[in-house]
Image: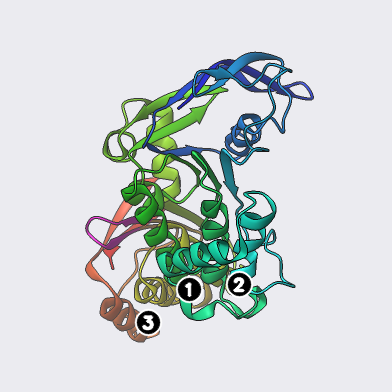
Amino acid sequence: MLRIENLCNKYNSRVVFNNLNLTVNKGEVIGIIGASGSGKSTLLKSILLLREFESGHIYFKDTEITKKSICSPAISGKIGLIFQNANSLFYHLSVINNITCGLIDIKHMKKKDAYEKAEGLLKLVGLNDKANDYPGTLSGGQQQRLSIARAYALDPELILMDEPTSALDPLAKKEVETVIKLMADKGETIIIVSHELELIKNVCSKVVFLNDGYVYEEGTPSEVLDSPKKDATRRFVKALRVLELSINSSDFDFIGLSTTLSEYAYRTSMPHSHMLKMHSVLEELFHVFIIDSKENNKLKILLEYNDKEDVVYGTVFATGDEIDTDNPYFYVSWKIIEKRTQDLEITRCDTDGFTNLLKFRI
């Protein structure tokens, strides 16, 4: 379906792609992952010929679309693009007319046929009861489902999705994920750029990790996300699942921590109840080691969510004297921590200047 050969691209003096090669077969759902700046979105723009590159070739159905004599397939509707937000929707048109306008103006369908097709698509994405509403009245997840239906209406042979669940709440993410699964089950060919491993794992047949300007590692979701062969892939996947925090004084922005924990929970599709327990535990640890201590203690906190086990593992390093959990100053906080966690254990350690080690799971 799509073949990219030796693609080279620079942004100012920085190399984005260095002889990047990628093959996408018909019916595959490819997940593209990589660190910020690795070229994930640039790759989609290159496929659409919206980004110039120094050298290389892109073939769509064995036709080299990088030749100047070939019009971009995106223009003729063969490649569809779904953005990371719904800003591309026509907010002055009803939900159903957001779909029919393309069918009538681009596909030149009769109005009756266009509306019949649009109704079927709205039913597919679960928005048939919203046909006469306007996009501004829809939730974020509903707007993204409408964006997918609108792109899908033009019968593209390849669909590109750029962070399709970005900034959506967990319920909306699942709504969009369900729609993508339906498309995959119908045999659609899809490329998804996303930093959300849960989405990639649940809907993709192949995962591609971009690093150092080329396809660093690729394979099934299980191979790349659960058992990566290369160190850089392993570090990247682990970094997305691990949240590291450092608390060095009582001036720590604990209110801002709520936002950090929420973003981490959304990114890993963690249950809301786990996030609340994390927040409660960290608040009590803040009091035990920082607020209620006479010493200038420091904390290093590592949180890792294991989606298979649905468990949060916590590791906390702290400076200062050995904590006496029976001390009246700590007693109430410690009981709260015990109630929120399992396998709670605190021991002495000697690691990078830290003297207390606390481990727990939620």
Q: How was this image coloured? A: rainbow
Q: Which residue does the image show at 52% across and 27% down from the upper left?
A: 211
What's the distance in space between the residues labelled 3 and 2, CA to CA?
51 Å
Q: Which circle marks residue 94 in the picture?
A: none
Query: Can residue 13 be seen from the camera position used here?
Result: yes
Q: Which circle marks residue 127 in the picture?
A: 1
Q: Where residue 265 sits in the image (x, y, percent)?
A: 44, 64
What's the distance in space between the residues labelled 3 and 1, CA to CA?
47 Å
Question: Which image quarter is the N terminus in?
Answer: top left
Q: Is residue 70 left or right of residue 195?
A: right
Amino acid on which the number 3 mark rests in the picture: Ser
Amino acid on which the number 1 mark rests in the picture: Leu
Vertical relation: 37 (above or below) 260: above
Q: Which circle marks residue 333 in the picture?
A: 3
The magenta segment is 304-314
Q: Is residue 36 left or right of residue 227?
A: right
Tell us which disc is closer to us: 3 or 2: 2
Query: Can residue 260 be seen from the camera position used here?
Result: no
Q: Earlier in the sequence, mark 3 or mark 2?
A: 2
Q: Which circle marks residue 95 in the picture?
A: 2
